[in-house]
Amino acid sequence: EKALNISKKINGSEHPDTALYFNNIGSIYYSLKQFNQALSYHRKALEIRKAILGEANVDVAASYNNIGTIYNDLGEYDKALECYARVLNICIPLLGENHLQVATCYNNMGLSYDYKGDYDKGLAYFQKSLAIAQQLFGERHTQVALCYNNIGYICQLRRQYQEALAYYEKALNIYTAISGSNHPNVALCYNNIGMV
């Protein structure tokens, strides 16, 4: 907040640094699970970024992504999906289909559909995210493991327990290879396997 106040005085309200500080404060409120406060700050960051950078900019896309994530946590899944659609409309022309930001957006859309109970669409978006992550990073990367975990969860919800187990074990193998056996992601995988 001190940095934000200094930036406003030196740079004015419509400056990339001012938008960055609004964004950072929003992220802190999000971490504190104060979602309405977080939403307010991320919206301010978005307004500034759009005003100075235009709609077609990766920082604007990042703001839409942050707002979409908050809407997911607030249970407003359709609003989240609208934000993620804007992220894709910005990122695909600028970065191409095979980019981490696009894969992350597909994953977030998968979560929205999962929370809505539309498991078919959720699975389709998780698979899109997985395909990009595999192409970018190969098989041994945390983004790939995250996708396997999310696909496993959809399979579990659909009572496809053997498939769920296979995806959770793939995620476990990647997380263990990357982070060692004493990591929260490894614990999560063990928990998921136990649930199956």
Image: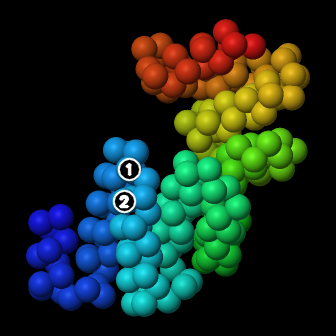
Above or below 150: residue 107 = below
* Residue 67: % across, % down: 51, 63
Front residue (pair 155, 70): 70
Determine which residue is flagged by label 2: 37
State whether residue 59 appears in this view.
no
Pick the quarter of the image with the C terminus: top right
Q: Which mark is residue 34?
A: 1
The image position of residue 163, as x and y in percent, is 84, 22
Residue beneath the point at 31% across and 69% down: 22
Left-right relation of 82 to 12: right
- Residue at the extreme top: 194
In screen coordinates, is 53 left or right of 159? left
* Three-letter code for the amino acid on which mark 1 is drawn: Gln
Task: Please report the residue visible at 51 percent of the width from the left and 80 percent of the height from the top.
Answer: 57
| Left or right: where 55 falls relative to 33 | right
Q: Name the residue type under label 2.
A: Gln
Distance (Cα) linking label 1 and label 2? 6 Å
| Picture layout, residue 31 above or below residue 172 | below
Q: Nearer the viewer, residue 120 or 128?
A: 120
Circles 1 and 2, Cβ within 8 Å, touching? The answer is yes
In this rendered view, identify the residue nearer to me: 115 or 151.
115
